[in-house]
Image: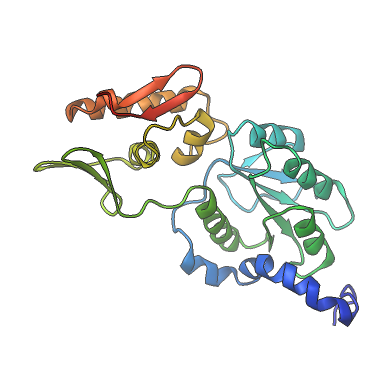
Amino acid sequence: MPHCLPPLGLLGPLLTAWLPHAWPGLLGHAALSAGSTEPTRHSVLYVDFSRGAACPLDNAQPASPALALEQLRDGSSWAAMLRCAPDSGAPLDWIMGVRHHPESAHAVLLALVDDAAGPIALQALRAGADAVLDGRSPAMVQAQLARLRQRVAPEPVGCLCLAPGCSLHADSRELRQADTARALQPQLFRLLWALCERPGRVLNPATLRVALDIPARADSQALHTAVGRLRRLLREFGLHEHLQTVHGSGYRWADPG
């Protein structure tokens, strides 16, 4: 038995709290079949508290603790991986700092540890990490992030009615009107779906950046460029007036009536 295990009388409550979070990491290969197979999101940050450990994913964005905290709070990133050092309390303090701030409280935090059954893993979960994982397997990290993203931005399912006689279909990413069907590029499809899924609601740039998977390092014009492309496409269907800009707040899908 590992020397770090608590007395047997405490195992029941601890395992009850820990296993729902730890099993996806311990069984990362099983999670691969359940999660999305899309590439890991570029808007994921990587914070290294272990003095030089390599990031497990090539397309994550390395960031200092301060910069990562700023980008989680302003909504330019939806998640952060943090490499924990077993002899340091800094990552635990940082996790609690993310959780205690109202603007970052719902960010996804994945703690990377050397031992997913060790004491640092349990401490990270208690501090507020969503899951702990052995960070030496990129495939397992990929699967866990895909699983966690479903909570933030679920994959579109079914179809949405955009206007009378016009619908958007998730399975084919098609915009259909009468006898016309147009397959949309993935980014434009996600943008249109996010807006039409909540008609009349103003979606702020941070929310739309997550829906579009715009990298945290991309400038603010990336979203506006995507909106402009979508508006030009909608003009072909006579739907461009539904996509409205609410200056200083964001965008919404509305009935121009």
Residue furthest left as drawn: 179
Q: Quadrant of the N terminus?
A: bottom right
Residue at (61, 72) in percent of width and height = 27
Side of 21 where 2 appears, left or right: right
Side of 173 where 150 appears, left or right: right
Tell me where residue 165 appears, x and y as whole percent. Answer: 16, 40
Above or below 255: residue 156: below
The quadrant holding residue 200 is: top left
The answer to which of 100 and 75 lies nearer the viewer is 100
Tell me where residue 25 appears, x and y as whole percent. Answer: 64, 66
Residue at (46, 52) in percent of width and height = 154
Residue furthest top as drawn: 247
Tell me where residue 39 appears, x and y as whole percent. Answer: 47, 51
Side of 203 where 196 appears, left or right: left
Above or below 204: residue 137: below
What colouring style does the render use? rainbow
Can I make out residue 226 in this image?
no
Above or below 219: residue 5: below
Residue at (44, 53) in percent of width and height = 38
Side of 7 where 242 appears, left or right: left
Tell me where residue 168 appears, x and y as whole percent. Answer: 26, 44
Above or below 73: residue 231: above
The answer to which of 68 and 9 lies nearer the viewer is 9
Can I make out residue 21 in this image?
yes
Q: Quadrant of the C terminus?
A: top left
Q: How many marks?
A: 0
The quadrant holding residue 178 is: top left
Residue at (59, 68) in percent of width and height = 28
